Amino acid sequence: MVAMAIAIGLLAGFGAVGIQWCIRFFQHQFWGAEEFPPELLASIPWYMKILIPTVGSLLVGAIVYFFAREAKGHGVPEVMQAIAVRNGVIRPRVALVKLLASSLYIGAGGSVGREGPVIQIGSAIGSTLGQLFRLNPQRVKIFVACGASAGIAAAFNAPIGGALFSVEVILGDFAVSQFSPIVISAVVATVVSRSMIGDFPAFLVPHYELVSPVELIFYAGLGLLIGLTALLYIRVLYRFEDFFDDLPIHDILKTVIGGVVIGCVGIFVPQIFGVGYHATNAVLHHETISPFGPDLLWLFLILLTLVKIFATSVSLGSGGSGGVFAPALFIGAMTGGAFGEVIHNYFPTMSAHSGPYALVGMAALVASSTHAPITAILIIFEMTNDYKIILPLMISCVIATLLTTRLQKESIYSLKLLRRGIDLFGNREVNILRSLKVQDILRTDPVVIPASMPLSRLIDTFLGCHYNQLFVVDRNERLIGRITLSEVRKLIQDQEYLADIVIAHDLINSQVVSIHSTDSLDQVMRIFGRHAVEELPVVKAGNGKSIMGLVSYRDVMEAYNRELIRRDLVTETGANIQLLEKTPRIEVTKTFSLAEIPVSMRFEGKSLTDLDLRNNYDVNVLVIRRKGEDGEKEEVVPTPKTTVQRGDTLIVLGRDQDIQRLQNQ
C-alpha cells in the first residue's frame, strides 16, 4: 500500500504540474501571455475575445464527445460516482482526455478552475493502477482517493489540505487504515510540485492581523453573507445545467454557444476569463481598480461576484471541462473583499482593510459550497502559514457551512449525483442497485405465446409454467401485451364453453412496461414500485419489441442481497486475513472460523486437487502464504493445480473441529 501510494503521488504530482504547463502553453497560443493581465486584455480586439473562447469550446466539445464524456463538467462528482457505484473503476483514458480538454478550455478563456480536473486526473491514475494490479474494490477506492488528495495537494502546495479534502469530500470516511496512504500520496505529490515549479503558494497572501476583538463579530457576519452567496452559486450552476440539457441541439453546439457567451461577457468584464487567479490576487492585496471610482469599489466587487457566477455556470452547463473550486475562491474573495470595504469604511479603527476579509471569504465559500469546512480552513492555513488567521477562518467557515447546509442539504458536488439518483451517504441500497444491471439477473426462459392461442391451450400453458404472467407477441414476434394468471382464473369455470371462442388476444393487457438488458436494477425497482407487477419483460435494444427474457421482483431482491453480502465479505475477509498475522484463529460466524495452518510434511509437493481438503477435512483453502524469492512473505490465491511447498502456511475457512483435525495431521 505504501509503495502504491508513493507511485500514485508521483504520477498525480506530474499530472498536476502537467496541466499547469499545458494551460500556460494554450494561453500563449491563444492570447500571447500567461494568465489574463488587464493590460493584455485591453490590447486585444473585441472580436478576438469572442473568437478565441468559441474556437476553444468547439475543440473541447469535440474532444469530450468523441473520446471520454466523463471529462465534461467539473469532474469531482464523476470521481465520487465511481467510488459509490463502480467500485472505484475509472477508464484510464479519462486522465489524458481531462488533461487536454481542461487545459485547452481554460487556456482559451473558459471561466472554470484547474483543481477539479487535477482531482479527476489523479483519481483516474489511482484507479488505473488498482485495475492494473487487479486489486479488490476496497483498495481501488482508496487508490482513487489517494489520487484525489495528491492532485489537490500539488495544486495548492498544501499536503494536509489535500489529504483532508480526499477523506472529507471524496470518501466521507476518516478511517485510519485508508487515511495513511492518502497522506503519503499527498506528501509525495507536493514534493513533486515543489521540485518542478517551486515552493510557492497558490496565492500571494497579505499580512493579517486582528485589529480588534470586535472584528470577530464582523467575520461572523461575513460567514452569513458567504453562506447565502454559496447557495446562489450552487443553484445558478444547476439551473444552467438544466437549461443546456433541455436544448434540442447537439452537445458540441451547446459547448460552442457557451464559448460565444463567455466571449461576449469577457469583452466587458475580462476578469472572468480563465481560473481568475490574477484578479483574486489583486483583491487580496487591495489592488483592484474599480471603473466606478475608489469609493464604489465594493459595488464593482459585487458585480464581479455575480458575473463570475454567471460565467462559470454557463461554462460548465454548456459542457465545458473544468472545476468549480477556483471559481469558488474567486467568488469568495470578491464577496469578502466587498464586505471588507463596507466594514472598513464604517469602522476604520476596528477593522482591517479588505484583503483579510477576501482571504477568509475564499475559504468560507469553498467550505459552504463543498460542505468541507475542515479542508477549507487547513488549505488557507497552509497557504498563509499564519496562526492568527485561524479564528476568523473557523468562525466564517463554520457559520457559512451551517447556513448553507441548513438551506441546501447537498453540496455542489453531491447535488449532481443526487440528481442522477445517487445518494452517497444516506442510501446504500440505491447505490448497490445502480451497480447491477438487468443482464446480471436476466432469465432467458420467458413464456411467450402467440396472440391467436385459444383459451384451452392458454390454461394448459399456465399450469405447466412457474410464472404469474405470459407475454403475448404478434406475427412479427413483437411484444404486444401480457396475460396474468388472475385474468385466466376468472374464466376457468366456463372453460368448456369458451375454450374455442376466446383467444389470447381477447385477454391481453396492452399496458405492459418493458426494460432493456443494460438498465440498472435501480431503474427496474422504480418501475416495480410504480406498477403492480412481479415480472417485467426484457426487450432487445434497437429491435422494437422483440422479447429476450424477463426479470422478476424476487430476482432483484436476491441480487441485491448477494451483492451486499459479497461487499461485506470482501471487506471483512481481507481484514481478517491480515489480522491472522497477530492471532492464530478468528471467528467469522458462530460456526466458522479463519485459521492459519503450517503445511505438514505429508502435504509437501502435492496439489490441492491431490489433497482434496474440502472432502477430507471439510475446510476451504482461501490463501497460501509462502516466502518469495526476496525472502519476503507473499500471498497466493490458489487454484486446484497449485502445489503446496515446504514452509507454506494455509489460510483456511471451516468449522473449529474440522480445522483442529487438519492441524493434527
Image (cartoon, rainbow, N blue to C red):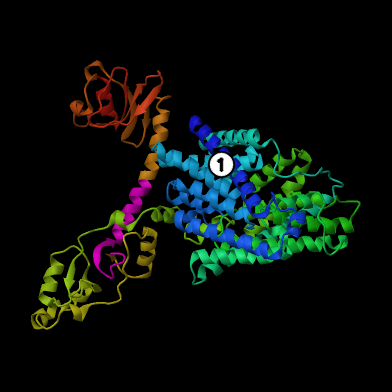
Q: Is residue 139 visible?
A: no
Q: Nearer the viewer, residue 307 or 360?
A: 307
Give the vertical position of 142 relative to 323 (above or below).
above
Can the viewer see residue 620 in this picture?
yes
Query: Residue 533 location in percent, x, y?
Result: 30, 68
Q: Specify start and end residues of the magenta stretch as a single range.
A: 540-565
Mark 1 neighbour class, 10 Å CA radius: few under 14, some 14 to 19, many 20 or more? many
Q: Nearer the viewer, residue 502 or 85?
A: 85
Image position of 652 (left or right of 362): left
Quadrant in which the C terminus appears: top left
Q: Secondary structure at mark 1?
A: helix
How many numbered marks have been drawn onto this rendered protein structure? 1
Q: Position of residue 250 (x, y in %)?
A: 48, 67
State the residue lying farthest toward the top: 601
Towards the viewer: 336 or 60: 60
Name the residue located 13 percent from the left edge and 78 percent from the top edge.
493
Q: Residue furthest right?
A: 349
Front-lying residue, 173 or 78: 78
Q: Is residue 517 above or below residue 375?
A: below
| Residue at left offset 57%, top offset 49% | 117
Residue 639's image quarter?
top left
Residue at the spot of label 1: 15
Q: Is residue 131 magenta?
A: no
| Membership of 544 in magenta stretch | yes
List x then y, in percent, for residue 261.
Answer: 63, 67
Callout 1 amino acid:
Gly
Q: Quadrant of residue 431?
A: bottom left
Kindly identify the residue that appears in the image at 19 percent across and 68 percent down: 448
Which quarter of the figure has residue 574?
top left
State left or right for residue 596 relative to residue 19.
left
Left or right of 191, for residue 120: left
